[in-house]
Amino acid sequence: MSDRPIKLSISALGGQGGGVLADWLIEIAEAEAYLVQSTSVPGVAQRTGATIYYLEFFPRAVAERLGREPVMALMPGSGDVDCVLASELAEAGRAIQRGLVSPERTTLISSTHRAYVISEKSAMGQGAADTVQLLELVRSQAKRLILFDMEETAERNQSVISSVLLGALCGSGVLPFRKETFRHAIEKSGIAVKANLAAFEDACQRAQRGDSGFTGKTGPTLPAEVPAHARAPRLQPLLDRIRKMPAPVQPVVLAGARRAIDYQDPAYAGLYLDRVERVVPLEGGQAPPGSWALLEAVARGLALWMTFEDTIRVADLKTRGSRITRVGEEIRAEPGQVFGVTEFMKPRVEEIAGTLPAGLGSWVLRSPRARRWLARWTGGRQIRTRTVSGFMLLHLLGGMRRWRRGTLRYQEENRRIEDWLRRIQELAPRHYSLAVELARAQRLIKGYGETHERGWRNFTALLEQLEMLAARSDGAIVLAKLQTAALADEEGVSLRRELQAIQTLV
């Protein structure tokens, strides 16, 4: 037996059972006649990262032989951890960044799946960490690596990821404890014992085999080709129009049309195609042969802009049967089991006015008295969709999409879209690359409420520079740089800095 403690760190997001796993390990260690110390530093659950649990194990027999209690640390030290368990791939990367994983010493046990934190989901641009780069990082840093999709293993066994982590740890042999003791800890908990034991055994065997391959889920991809026949006869004319467009952009246009139908109706998809078709003649002149860059950028950005998030869309998505089914699957509800969802809504006066008929909504925004009255209905509200009244409130609001075309928000966005397309049409014959970047700049406009306002403010700031950029040979490069700056932070500090630098050079 070594006279040095075994040191282990666990990184788990809220709801992934990191605390349960730590408790199991304490119970296992004590049953195996080991002294154990456990500390934890909580994160903010899914919002900003994981809670870190740190445990040190020391054999009681060695302590008695030495005649003194071992001195154990409260937190892991850089390069001084024997094993790191990470409940998802980015947490493994963060453990490496903190210096907890050492190529000379550490066994890294991690899932390959991703559970995106709020900072990734709410980023102004593409905020998600690159999975391929994360995989390369974890494969290069650990002395020993056990890596597989633990979420899939848990789902397949109808269990939780903490059981999978425990099984992988047992199979790794890092801890000198008997497998029966691990199993007994799960049995003693008395919660979903059969499923947890199945997941434990599955993961244990994979760890013993030394699995380190990537079997994680990939994101959705566009179809390789557009089908010849629509799912419904009334949609065939739309599909025929899509198939007349250049082949390389047909999958993007098809995805945009489907999104428009889901958002509104087939007629709205027809309007989407009308607008895309206006760009087709612009591909020529200065356009590189066969690139179709402008058409693809417009098709992609237009689909997102035309399906802007308003209160009607939010309510529609929250009351769909597919969402209720997904929530039930995530919480593993039994057939016939009743569960409820509480929606946290925080509408502002602007969102309420945007859902009203255009004339009435405009009057509300101009009237201080009307704004004060409507403000009573704003602020944080909790709507329980498990109740008839709560569900019907959101369901009726989502059903208002048949009147969406008459709302203030729709007419405002429609005007903005037409102005964007007009500018692209004017630029393309003379400054094709600048027109492409203007089309791509639509990515600044996203989200709902204040997030949308920030995006529109940044987009407007870029529009104000178009005339100046059109007079420069590097106008497209500068506009691309401005977009990157606009996506760098929510406060707009980077964008203001870049705009000031441009004004200085003019």
Image (spheres, rainbow, N blue to C red):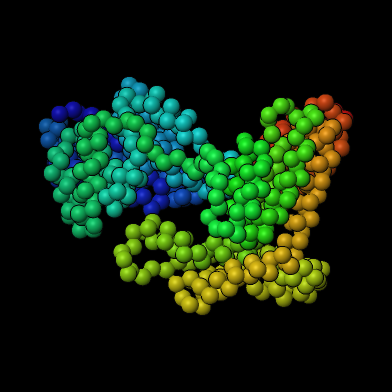
One can see residue 24 in this view: no
Query: Which residue is at the front of the view, 313 or 459?
Result: 313
Residue at point 87%, 31% (across, down)? 471
Residue at point 77%, 39% (across, down)? 281
One can see residue 123 in this view: yes
Picture coordinates of residue 208, whole percent (x, y) = 21, 33
Residue at point 87%, 37% (across, down)? 467
Position of 441 relative to 305 (above/below): above
Query: Which residue is at the front of the view, 266 or 348?
Result: 266
Position of 353 relative to 59 (above/below): below
219 to the left or right of 283: left
Picture coordinates of residue 34, whole percent (x, y) = 17, 40
Residue at point 78%, 72% (across, down)? 360
Q: Could you say which quadrant of the image residue 502 lies in? A: top right
Query: Which residue is at the front of the view, 65 or 356?
Result: 356
Question: In the current view of this chain or complex, which residue is farthest to the bottom?
Answer: 389
Question: Quick one: quadrant of the C terminus?
Answer: top right
Question: In the current view of this chain or complex, which residue is farthest to the top?
Answer: 104
Position of 112 relative to 357 (above/below): above
Position of 401 relative to 278 (above/below): below
423 to the left or right of 98: right
Picture coordinates of residue 113, whole percent (x, y) = 40, 41
